[in-house]
Amino acid sequence: MLFVFESESRSVFWMREMQFPLDFVWIGSDCSVGDITKDVPAPSPDTILADLNRYQPAVPVQYVLEINAGDIKALGIGKGDPVVFVGGLTGLFGC
């Protein structure tokens, strides 16, 4: 899932009701990977909102791509890598 924000910020994400682990690719407005978060576990179903872990990038970003846990490693994604949106996203968001 791709999240697109109006401008760069250090948005905070949590995994409420998520049932499987994810990786986060934090993407700057310059269309490069600003940070990565690997293997974010799904919370226990009985975890209350106030107790959910929060995740945010080390730097301001404009886009956040959630992918299956392990995909960052499998695809060799690293900080500073260029990002290009393709398919139905081509030309829509600047990357």
Image (cartoon, rainbow, N blue to C red):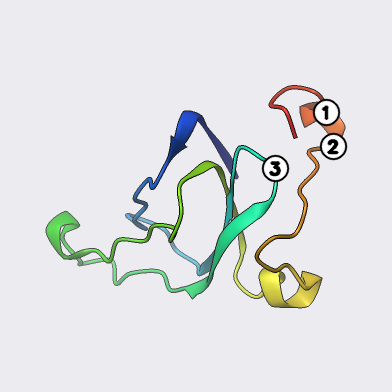
Q: Earlier in the sequence, mark 3 or mark 1?
A: 3
Residue occupied by mark 1: 90
Q: Which mark is residue 58?
A: none
Image: 11 above or below 57: above
Front: mark 3 or 1 = 3
- Numbered disc in front, either 3 or 2: 3
- Quadrant in the picture for the C terminus: top right
Q: Secondary structure at mark 3?
A: loop
The dot on residue 86 is 2
- Identify which amino acid the numbered label 3 is placed on: Cys
Of the pair 19 and 92, the residue shown nearer to us: 92
How many residues crowd mark 2 within 10 Å: few (<14), some (14–19), many (20+)? few
Q: CA distance from mark 2 to mark 1?
A: 5 Å
The answer to whether marks 2 and 1 mark residues whose Cβ atoms lie closer than 8 Å is: yes
Reading the image, the residue beneath label 3 is: 31
Task: Residue 48: name its quadrant.
Answer: bottom left
| Crowd tier of the residue under label 3, counting other residues whose Cα lies within 10 Å: few below 14, some 14–19, many 20 or above | many
52 displayed left or right of 43: left
Of the numbered discs 3 and 2, the one sitting upstream in the chain is 3
Q: Quadrant of the N terminus?
A: top right
Q: Give the SS element for disc 1.
A: loop
Residue nearest the observer in this picture, 72 or 29: 29
Q: Residue 86: image x %, image y %?
A: 84, 37
Q: CA distance from mark 3 to mark 2?
A: 13 Å
Q: Position of residue 49 (x, y in %)?
A: 18, 55
